[in-house]
Image: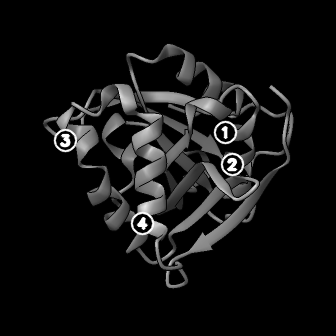
Amino acid sequence: MELSVINLRHFEYGHLPDGFRELLVDVHADAYADAMDDPFNQRFPWFVDHWSGREGFTCVVAYDEGEPTGFAYGAPLAPGREWWRSTGYRPKDGRSSTYAVSEVMVRPRWRKRGISERLHGALLKERTEDLAVLLVDVTHPKVRALYESWGYTGVGEQQPFADSPVFAVMVKDLRAPCGTSTRPES
């Protein structure tokens, strides 16, 4: 398959175009086509509404000649509501402002081209928080290894909803200089 130029477009809370929700839902339906019988995956439109309605929400969508190929989105977490708190993890130096990376997904046809890493990097590039946090299904060790290669460290597990998978809680220090360890302090 010939490689194409992937363009990234940034979106934020309060400035979402018409059809934005449907775009994310459609990409999700393609990315999870083999798992759409799962009630948790069927609730994705609710998650889009929840996250996109939060002040500070940002999203990056990748396009291949106008066709959406994937996206990444998230929002800052309120102090005291950070996902890592339930794990016993304590950030070094008390720095704890946290940006939650809620979703990173790429449609099957465009996988294995580095698009997810580009989306993730673009999503976090301008963040001012101390930490990024995300959840990874514990039954997906390759995905966890990918996030570890991007500087995340697992700090525990949680099941945020009764019908959700158990997730590994992963944290990345956004203030760590390039080439330094991001291992959390216990």
The first of marks 4 and 2 along the sequence is 4
Q: Which residue is mark 3?
A: 161
Which of the two residues, 7 or 72, is positioned nearer the viewer here?
A: 7
Residue 79 visible in the displayed image: no
Q: Are marks 1 and 4 in contact (CB under 8 Å)?
A: no
Q: Which residue is mark 4?
A: 21
Residue 150, image x and y in percent?
Answer: 70, 33
Residue 146 sits above or below residue 120 on the image:
above
For numbered disc 2, what is the local secondary structure? helix
The first of marks 1 and 3 along the sequence is 1
Q: CA distance from mark 4 to mark 2?
A: 18 Å
Q: Residue at x 28, y 27 (%)?
A: 166
Q: Is residue 84 left or right of residue 2?
A: left
Q: Which residue is mark 2?
A: 119
Type of amino acid at the residue the image marks with label 4: Arg
For numbered disc 4, what is the local secondary structure? helix
The first of marks 3 and 2 along the sequence is 2
Looking at the rendered image, the disc whose residue lies closer to the viewer, 4 or 2, is 4
How dense is the environment of label 2, judged by Cα within 10 Å: few (below 14), some, or many (20 and up)? many
